[in-house]
Amino acid sequence: MVRKVALSACLAGKNCRYDGRLKENKELVKKLEDAGYEIVLFCPEESCFGTPREAMDLVLTDEGIKALGRVFHEDKSMPIVEYAERFFEENPDIDLFVGKARSPSCGVRTALLYDEDRNLISDKESGIMAAEARVRGIESVDDEDLI
Ligand code: SF4
């Protein structure tokens, strides 16, 4: 049976980062293909907010960890949670989740967490979509773990 990997679309060369810059990782994609994985791409932020868009940060608030816009500080968490839930419901057979390191949406164990004054308090968090993958028990790694 073909194994499926969910991969941050920016790593596969999609211009979906908040600033439109390319973050393609051809070596990683080849490694996954050579290992026989079928690759399923995702990008919660582009789907929810378009590209380019305001950057966001994970912030520890009184109501827990939220993804807040860096300029206007509005809470962008819920659309990303809903995207992630929909993605995993539509793709129930994902064997491996590979997220872009340090992303507030996709970083698995490397996302940066700030306090409300935007002081860095952790660099070992899960982004909003990666957290959803982990809650579902899907094996999850940052791209940097594989290359
Ligand atoms: S890190 Fe995640 S949210 Fe950001 S551009 Fe890549 S796939 Fe999209």
Image (cartoon, rainbow, N blue to C red):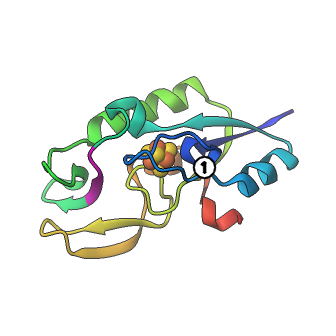
| Image quadrant where one finds the N terminus | top right
User: Which residues are drawn in magenta?
Assistant: 54-58
What is the three-letter code of the residue carrying label 1?
Leu
Q: Up-down: is 90 above or below 131?
A: above
Q: Is residue 128 magenta?
A: no
Q: Looking at the picture, tell me which residue is in the foreground, 94 or 72.
A: 72
Name the residue rendered at 61%, 51% in the picture: 24
Q: Locate residue 118, reporting x and y percent.
A: 18, 69
Q: Looking at the picture, tell me which residue is in the foreground, 10 or 8.
A: 10
Name the residue rendered at 64%, 44% in the picture: 12
Q: How many marks?
A: 1
Label 1 CB-ligand 1 distance < 8 A: yes
Name the residue rendered at 43%, 56% in the picture: 103
Q: Is residue 56 magenta?
A: yes
Furthest toward the top, the residue is: 90
Q: Locate residue 122, reporting x and y percent.
A: 34, 74
Q: Up-down: is 60 above or below 29?
A: below
Please give the residue where the numbered disc 1 appears in the rendered image. Answer: 11
Q: Up-down: is 116 above or below 45?
A: below
| Residue 129 visible in the shown view | no
